Image: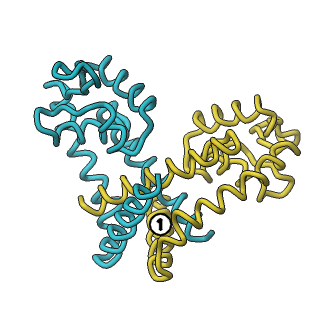
Chain colours: A yellow, B cyan
Amino acid sequence: MRAWRGYIVGSALLEYRLNRELQEEHDLTLTDYEILARLSEQPGMRMRMTHLAADVASSKSRVSHQIGRLELAQLVRRESCASDGRGVFAILTDRGFEVLSAAATTHLRGVRQHLVDALTADQLTALTVIFEGLAERLRAQP
Amino acid sequence: MRAWRGYIVGSALLEYRLNRELQEEHDLTLTDYEILARLSEQPGMRMRMTHLAADVASSKSRVSHQIGRLELAQLVRRESCASDGRGVFAILTDRGFEVLSAAATTHLRGVRQHLVDALTADQLTALTVIFEGLAERLRAQP
């Protein structure tokens, strides 16, 4: 339980800080940032809503709500899939890409300052192995 | 960035799973659980709202909203501080303690299954040291 308590408090403080920095400087939440970043890495900067939800490990209804807010801010738009009539795509707009690019500076600085610089090389490797392993295991047990 | 991406995805999947198990079995979110658990550990099962927010690494307005929901569900009640007229306490109710006790079984099982059993002893130690260190560092840089 000490590992779990240490993790839950440390990770909450980390996310709270990164979230606050993004909100103060760019009016984006950390989750907004994750969604925009994920879209920016896709061909055509577009992604099926269902894949997006799976990728950011969130529920469809929560992602749908978040995309709704990003759409109001004109950072993302939604489009029905023309080829099969099923599914809806979320697409990063030009404005979304601009906001993401500006926010990336803040986010990368925060991750470096509050995570990377705080750990030894061995700790950083351990962290990567631990959470990639947990993700793989969780995905194998739906 | 690989460490960060691995961490953000793994930790989101872990919290999503633990949250889902608590919601399905006890109609509590993981954050509800953390608040009830924190209150249960205090003398008189009561805590100043401001201390509670600092302890769960959340903002005062967010904690205030969550306590409002828990109060509606009769798991927590609020009381003004009699001695100094400042500050408001959140207090765990008998019903809150019962719900927490039942939910603890689910939560401890989930943490064991999805975190502790998934890691070696060395990884668990590394995880504890990493996040306790991050928390200490973040608290020192407000």
Residue B23 horizontal/vertical position (percent): 37, 35
- Which quarter of the figure is the N terminus of chain A placed in? bottom left
Specify whether residue A139 is in view: yes
Query: In percent of the image, x 60 and y 51: which residue is there?
Result: A56
The residue labelled by disc 1 is A131
Relative to residue B1, is residue B112 drawn left or right? left
Looking at the rendered structure, the kind of residue marked 1 is Phe
Q: Residue furthest front?
A: B84
A70 or B25: nearer the eye?
A70
Residue A123 horizontal/vertical position (percent): 44, 77
Query: In percent of the image, x 36 and y 59: which residue is there?
Result: A7
Query: In percent of the image, x 67 and y 48: which residue is there?
Result: A33
Specify whether residue A142 is in view: no
Placement of A129 over or under A40, stated as above or below = below
Relative to residue A103, is residue B141 drawn left or right? left
Residue B83 horizontal/vertical position (percent): 16, 22
Residue B2 horizontal/vertical position (percent): 60, 71
Quarter location, residue B93: top left
Name the subunit of mark 1.
Answer: A
Relative to residue A83, is residue B119 drawn left or right? left
Tell me the crowding category of disc 1: few under 14, some 14 to 19, or many 20 or more residues within 10 angstroms, Cα based.
many
B56 or A60: nearer the eye?
B56
Q: Secondary structure at mark 1?
A: helix
Quarter location, residue B41: top left
Quarter location, residue A38: bottom right
Query: In percent of the image, x 64 and y 47: which residue is there?
Result: A22
